[in-house]
């Protein structure tokens, strides 16, 4: 199939020389119209990355590869409802521009307690529960304080002043996430310069609950995680993810993975240390990030 280097659409591409016969013009028009239909069909079954690559083939292909009709397919079905909850209006001139806006700049939702973004490679939905959206034990007391940090996407983060009982929980409806997708949840945090007691083995859990289970069942299998890097040769517990530095300057630790194929119930996420009751301080919590497992590289 040959695509003309001219404008977009069958009208511009089907132009012929003045010397061409009416029959030749009609044949060219029909063949090119079929080619356009094939290209639309092909691009509709590719990924955003493939669509961007295809736009380099020719100006004719670029018209289809950049069209709103195509990029609408890459956006979540409920994207209009989601961005309607944005703290600030989400402005865009095309669906392609909106797609990359949502990939590159998380949008604050629901009075700034939640952020939403897309995974660039496939358009899967990601959410971060800000500290204000989490259930943090003793956060309404003098043991925690709220503060603003310029490096945070949220207006406030929660800083641990001093507690013995550390418990952070988050919940999210699976219907908010992309279906048939494997996700991981991460605690996003930093450690202040005057911290203490944060080299403990915490317990983490991520699972789906539908009301038939006891969400507070202490016998469920939990993974051990550490906020600070450790010498694995001296620790024999089943250790989950290790602390990683994010591109936004925060640290993150994986809390667990889950496959999202549910539409009811809740995703229950926990990070706790309630066994060794010694004083802890200096933990700065931005939130819990729930994003698709990156199949090619980590965000």
Image: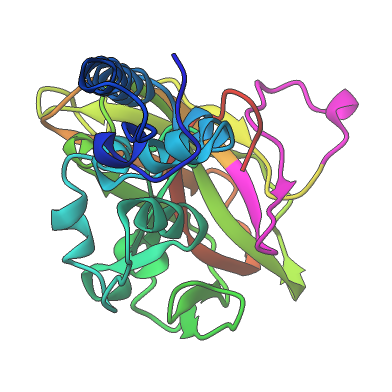
Residue that extends furthest to the front in the rendered view of this protein? 19
Q: Is residue 274 visible?
A: no
Observer-nearest of 131 and 139: 131
Observer-nearest of 11 and 235: 11
Q: Is residue 192 visible?
A: yes
Say which residue appears at 62% left-offset and 49% top-offset. 252
Say which residue appears at 40% left-offset and 58% top-offset. 97
- Residue 169 vertical placement versus 48 (above, below): below
- Residue 186 vertical placement versus 152 (above, below): above
The C terminus lies in quadrant: top right
Res 110 quadrant in image: bottom left
Q: Is residue 232 magenta?
A: yes
Res 1 quadrant in image: top left
Observer-nearest of 239 and 132: 132
Res 112 quadrant in image: bottom left
Say which residue appears at 33% left-offset and 67% top-offset. 92
Q: Is residue 158 magenta?
A: no
Residue 54 locus on image (x, y percent): 52, 30
Left or right of residue 103: residue 109: left
Residue 185 locus on image (x, y percent): 46, 39
Q: Total marks drawn?
A: 0
What type of secondary structure mainly makes up the magenta span?
A: loop
Left or right of residue 93: residue 297: right
Say which residue appears at 48% left-offset and 63% top-offset. 105
> Magenta segment, which residues?
230-253
Residue 90 locus on image (x, y percent): 30, 70
Left or right of residue 145: residue 124: left
């Amino acid at each position: 199939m040959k695509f003309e280097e001219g404008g977009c659409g069958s009208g511009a591409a089907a132009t012929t020389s003045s010397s061409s016969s009416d029959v030749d013009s009609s044949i060219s028009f029909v063949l090119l119209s079929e080619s356009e239909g094939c290209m639309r069909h092909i691009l509709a079954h590719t990924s955003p990355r493939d669509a961007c690559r295809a736009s380099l083939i020719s100006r004719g292909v670029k018209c289809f590869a950049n069209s709103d009709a195509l990029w609408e397919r890459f956006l979540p079905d409920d994207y209009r409802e989601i961005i309607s909850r944005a703290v600030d209006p989400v402005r865009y001139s095309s669906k392609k521009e909106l797609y990359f806006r949502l990939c590159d700049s998380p949008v604050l939702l629901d009075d700034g307690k939640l952020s939403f973004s897309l995974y660039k490679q496939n358009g899967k939905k990601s959410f971060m529960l800000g500290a204000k959206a989490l259930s943090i034990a003793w956060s309404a007391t003098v043991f925690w304080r709220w503060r603003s940090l310029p490096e945070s996407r949220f207006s406030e983060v929660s800083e641990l002043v001093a507690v013995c009982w550390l418990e952070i929980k988050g919940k999210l409806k699976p219907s908010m996430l992309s279906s048939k997708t494997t996700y991981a949840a991460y605690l996003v945090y930093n450690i202040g310069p005057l911290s203490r007691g944060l080299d403990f083995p915490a317990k983490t859990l991520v699972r789906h609950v539908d009301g038939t289970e006891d969400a507070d069942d202490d016998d469920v299998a939990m993974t051990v995680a550490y906020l600070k890097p450790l010498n694995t040769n001296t620790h024999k517990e089943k250790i989950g993810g290790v602390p990683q530095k994010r591109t936004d300057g925060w640290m993150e630790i994986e809390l667990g993975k889950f496959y999202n194929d549910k539409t009811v119930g809740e995703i229950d996420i926990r990070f706790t240390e309630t066994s060794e009751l010694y004083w802890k301080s200096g933990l700065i919590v931005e939130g819990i990030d729930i994003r698709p497992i990156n199949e090619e590289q980590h965000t």
